[in-house]
Image (cartoon, rainbow, N blue to C red):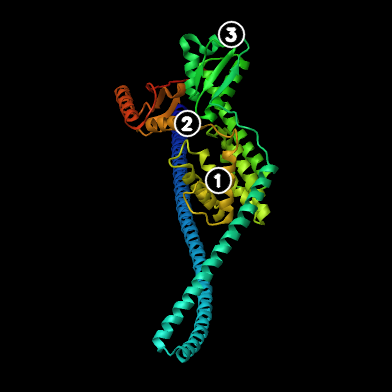
Amino acid sequence: MPKDILFSVLAGISGFALGLIVMVLVSKLGLNRDQQKASLLISEATNKADNLVRQAVLEGKTQAYELKLAAEKEIKERRQEIQELENKMSRREDNFHFREETLTNKEKQIDDKNKQLTEKLNVLEKMERDLQSKIDIQVTELERFANMTQAEAKKELMSAVEKKIQNEVTAYIREAEDDAKSIAADKARNIIGMAIQRYAQEETLERTVSVVALPSEEMKGRIIGREGRNIRAIEQATGVDLIIDDTPETITLSCFDPIRREIARLALETLIKDGRIQPGRIEEVVNKVTKELNETIQKVGEEAVFKLNIGKIDREIVGLIGRLRYRYSYGQNALQHSMEVAYLAGMMAAELGLNQTLAKRAALLHDIGKAMDFEVEGSHIEIGARIAKKHGENAVVINSIESHHGEVEPTSIISVLVAAADTLSAARPGARFESFENYIQRLEQLEKIATSFDGVEKTYAIQAGREIRVMVVPEKLDDMACHRIAREIREKIEAELTYPGQIKVTVIRETRASDIAK
């Protein structure tokens, strides 16, 4: 019994101890879990803090970089403004220096002229003193021999001397003038005759129409197109009138502007060879031909300058010289006329011992304004003078342009030679046709009247001036405005132009919409 009690006590103690141990172990295990959770929270907090710090640093760097870029841009703009101001100040300084040099040269010239005048005055005063001394001697002699008073003798003597000097001077001047005229006339005839003999030019046979040969009669129908859409597209794109009549296998192109007529001819020949004749293709070919013709014009101008050997000329002026190939005055080709005038003026300048290169240069450019008189207001003389001044041509060249029709007095012998050569070139047999210039001027004026209205983009005078087609900007004018502007153009033509028959005014307002299928 006591053993059972002892065993029970020991078992109770052992159970208690075991329970205590289990409780301790469970308590430690829970503590470890809390510690792990705490460590995990701390780690997450630390990571979040690090991320926030890194994000804040990154945002700070981004803002700093943006501020840096803005500052650099502002500095660059300020530097550019400063550079522009410096360039402007430099140009002004150069202008001031140039003006100062010009004023200095003028002052020097004035001083030289004053010195010359002073010397001439001194010589005249000396001559006057000598003459007065001789007159006094004559007066004394007359008083002694004629028993006259000094006033009477002086009057008689002065009358005799004046009459004698006047007769001698008149006779001398007349004789000198006659000799000078005779010598000048002979020399001028010799120089002009030699220049004409050394230069021969073919007659001008150009007209205002071009003829395009067709491979077959069937091609006429393709060029006309369905309901005439192709021929309308060609006329609208080029501003040229296509005349299709009973003449077999030919089409006639009519236009007063030879450059437009040449573009139409080349475009039509290209379309005929290609075979694809439709409005879209027509516009593409016309643009291509226009670009190629501009290159040809530049090349023609360069060849003309090279043939005359007149040195370097501004590229823009070279292009205008090339345009003269397609410009006619009274039926005479403007480029051939200008080159002919240059050859004649150069030969005459060489005979007179003048600057032959400068004479040829002035002669070649004397009608340069005709290259732009279709597009710019003013006579070809005014336009040419502005072009020459713009590109810094020699003053002799500018004066030759201004004076070759007698509107301005020539200031050099070369200007006189250019005017003479221009007259010779225009007056030779077969050079010009009188009615052609009047025809061109009427069509030019017709297009200028239509172009003067606001909203007009392009104008073409076609059918030999019997119709004017006006293309307007669709964004500026609506359909009602087109009717109004057609009426106003008609009224202005009736008020300002003199013309045979009737002139039809056609105003075209076209809106194009296009897209690309991919």
**Residue 194 percent coordinates (x, y):** 68, 46
Badge 3 amino acid:
Glu
Q: Kindly report the distance in space between the C-alpha atoms of the residues bearing marks 2 and 1.
A: 20 Å
Disc 2 on helix, strand or loop?
A: helix
Could you tell me which quadrant the N terminus lies in?
Answer: top left
> Residue at 57% across / 31% down in the picture?
291
Pointers 2 and 1 in contact (C-beta within 8 Å): no
> Residue at 49% across / 30% down in the picture?
435
Badge 2 amino acid:
Ile
Residue depth check, mark 2 versus mark 3: number of the one nearer the observer: 2
49 shown above or below 137: above
Q: Kindly report the distance in space between the C-alpha atoms of the residues bearing marks 3 and 1.
A: 46 Å
Q: Earlier in the sequence, mark 2 or mark 3?
A: 3
Q: Which mark is residue 440?
A: 2
According to the picture, the residue beneath numbered tag 3 turns out to be 217
Badge 1 amino acid:
His
**Residue 251 percent coordinates (x, y):** 56, 16
> Residue at 51% across / 70% down in the picture?
167
Q: Which mark is residue 366?
A: 1
Farthest residue in the front direction? Answer: 146
Q: Residues within 10 Å of mark 3 (few under 14, many from 20)?
A: few
Q: Kindly report the distance in space between the C-alpha atoms of the residues bearing marks 2 and 3.
A: 32 Å
Q: Name the image quarter holding residue 150.
A: bottom left
Q: Front-most of 375 and 99?
A: 375
299 shown above or below 60: above
